[in-house]
Amino acid sequence: MTTITLIPGDGIGPEIMDAALLVLDALKPGLDYEYADAGLAALEKHGELLPQATLDSIARNKVALKSPLTTPVGGGFTSINVTLRKHFDLYANVRPARSFPNTRSRFPTGVDLITVRENTEGVYIGEGQEVSDDGETAVLTSKVTHKGSERIVRYAFELARKTGRRKVTVVHKANILKSTSGLFLKTAREVAGRYADIECNELIVDNTCMQLVMRPEQFDIIVTTNLFGDIISDLCAGLVGGLGLAPGANIGEHAAIFEAVHGSAPDIAGKGIANPCALLLGVGQMLDHLAKPELANRLRDAIIATMEAKDALTPDLGGTGNTMGFARAIAARL
Ligand code: NAI
Ligand code: MG
């Protein structure tokens, strides 16, 4: 049996985690679960947002399924998600976006792409943040390394090979950000040269946003630096039906954390109406990672079939269903 760490999280977190476990049970994946706390739930129980026991559990099991966490505003708390990515050096943030039926989205067909976002560098290193005494000037440091660029672009090309995708688009702003984005682009070209079987093109980030909105079907895999990837992947989620359908994987050499892209949704927490699909699609990514692709594909097929049948859809998709009803409808198709 493989043991994975489960972090039920805050707000709608425990609700969608229950739904995910109900569906996982129907798949009989042969997994054992070890529960761990993080976020507000951990602060209330243990007096800290990210207890050592949780870090130990992830380090031991190497795979975690995490629901959204609430980072308290103010009080000098750094984001737990950023802390986890740093602690385990989870350098690849992998965010698929694909068209689903019956979502009221702008692209009910034709979108099937993956954003591979560098997850540890760029302006998110949080260094050099200064505001002048008169409050007139603010600066911030960005850091891009050859090593960091090489491994994320290599990850994107390897992902293309593994999933039978044909094209990698390198997204940058090297015309203006000559040092940081320039190094990223130069390194990406080096790496691309080693993958003659995969088509590679380069696109400046602002043009990428316009192209995504006008003709998203031209994209297959996008690889880019941290900030651009953060923004582009939310844009892609918006193309296909919103946050309720957007999963993300944070992958490093020694650990991987699978999650929904969305947050703890305090506005609907406790109502039992959160869409469980984002976390469930994260479960699909986790099953792929655990070398159980046939289970992952069955899960994705069951989600699509449930949406096709408009069975028990949650309100964000225009339905009148609830979280557990949606999960039961998916599980019934397994
Ligand atoms: P949010 O993603 O929680 O909510 C934004 C909007 O989307 C809300 O209207 C919410 O109801 C809706 N929504 C989100 N997930 C949904 C789902 N599964 N089904 C249906 N509707 C859904 O973002 P917000 O409000 O900015 O952040 C709330 C809290 O979440 C904050 O404390 C923030 O720090 C945290 N957060 C945590 C993340 C994580 O742990 N990965 C990621 C983003 C935010
Ligand atoms: Mg984001």
Image: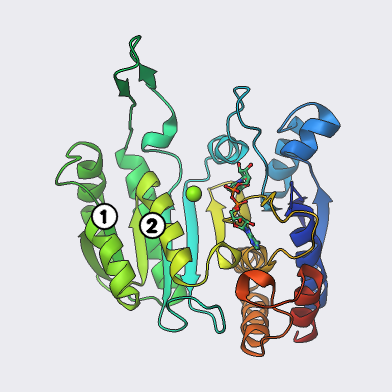
Question: Callout 2: few (<14), some (14-19), or many (20+) C-alpha neighbours within 10 Å?
Answer: many
Measured along the vertical axis of the image, is residue 141 above or below residue 224?
Answer: above
Residue 5, x across and y down, in percent: 75, 50
**Marks 2 & 1, CB-CB < 8 Å contact:** yes
Residue 288 visible? The answer is yes
Which residue is painted at 74% across and 46% down in the image? 10
> Please, is residue 47 above or below residue 187 in the view?
above
Disc 1 marks a residue whose amino acid type is Val
Residue 76 placed where, x, y %?
59, 22
In this view, 101 is above or below 16: below
- Location of mark 2 (residue): 232
Q: Quarter holding the N terminus?
A: bottom right
Name the residue that disc number 1 marks: 205
Disc 2 secondary structure class:
helix
**Closer to the N terminus: mark 2 or mark 1?**
1
Residue at image point 59% right, 46% down: 254
Residue 85: x, y in percent? 55, 41
Across and down, in percent, residue 22 comes to: 82, 70
Q: Is residue 191 above or below residue 327?
A: above
Q: How many marks?
A: 2
